[in-house]
Amino acid sequence: MPDIATINGIAEDNISHHNGGTASLYTSKNGDTWGHLSHTTATGGDSIANDGDYKVHTFTSSGTFEVTNVGTDASYSWLVIAGGGSGGNNWGGGGGAGGYRTYHSSDTSGGGGSESNGSFSGTGSHSVVVGAGGSSDGSGGSDSVLPSNSITSTGGGGGCNHDYSGGGPGSAGGTGGSGGGGTNGGAGGGRSSPTQGNVGGTAASAPYYPGGGGGGASAAGANGSGGNPGNGGAGLASTITGASVTRAGGGGGCAYAIGNRGSGGAGGGGLSGYYPPAVAGANATANTGSGGGAGYGPAGNGGSGIVIIRYKYQN
């Protein structure tokens, strides 16, 4: 039999008594089930917002997600983005975006990866880790972790630094959630497993040494060619908060003595610097997990990551 939704036009949830008895004591009326739904309740995060019948907990820094009641509909959606890698210095490669893993609606993870639902088991405290962005030239970002289903997103690979004093070929960008860009003929960095991002772009050599762009969540970093450094790969959009927001773009690569700049990928990737004059790479946007821009001299820092948890709290 169907649940009773209303009695005489009054919502079942708003009825406290029926025929003198407390409504919660009744399991049926005239043979129909009188359903009493329990809703999930939780605390934690740097902000908590409502989106219709859903609660959205956003962690922009590490903290604790505390489940105080497990509801009848106890399913969760989540987005876990790691910290992005920094760009490389001395016309280096762009930083790779942090790993992008999600379970929400029809969204996909970075690089086209897929995930299974990571529901929390019962009540209790769950330590959420938000990874930092790479903060020194060529350094990778840090992992973000959601304890449900042991979800770990891998920090983005750092863009390769260019050794302008030597004459040998350059090195590959760092491997990470998305790979960092290479420099001086070097390959782009690889992506981690499970799939959560894209590879970095390759670099060309003399005379302009254009660095490759850092990989982004939805696209690989572009290759450097001629006098043009590679642009960072684009990030991915998510509607888990109720609005469409794009995050996890790769950082732009840098070229020598040409003035051309590599653009950061959509979603907060850093714009590269250039030479001459000596211009530093731009930092990626905080809490997007994007890669920093390469620079002549200092490179841009990677953006810190983010963790978002969504669940139904009312009908």
Image (cartoon, grey):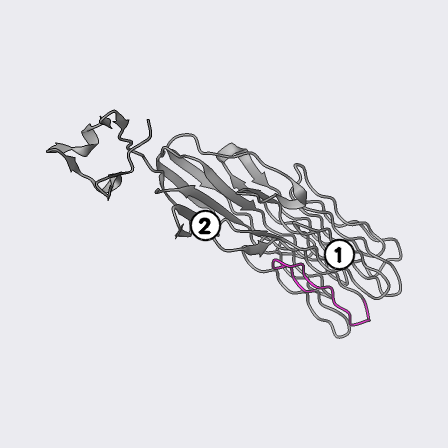
Give the extent of the magenta segment.
256-271
Q: Is residue 138 magenta?
A: no
Q: Amino acid at mark 2?
A: Thr
Which residue corresponds to mark 1?
A: 161
Quarter that holds the N terminus: top left
Front residue of 290 and 32: 32
Asked whether, in this view, residue 281 is left or right of residue 238, the answer is: right
Mark toward the viewer: 2 or 1: 2
Q: Is residue 265 magenta?
A: yes
How far across and down, in percent of the image, does residue 211 sit?
79, 59
Q: Which mark is residue 58?
A: 2
Q: Amino acid at mark 1?
A: Asn
Instruction: Kindly report the distance in space between the C-alpha atoms of the residues bearing marks 2 and 1.
Output: 34 Å
Front residue of 51 and 196: 51
Q: In which quadrant of the rendered view does residue 73 lie?
A: top left
Direction bottom: furthest residue: 277
Question: Of label 2 and label 1, which has the lower sequence position?
Answer: 2
The residue sitting at 68% across, 44% down in the picture is 111
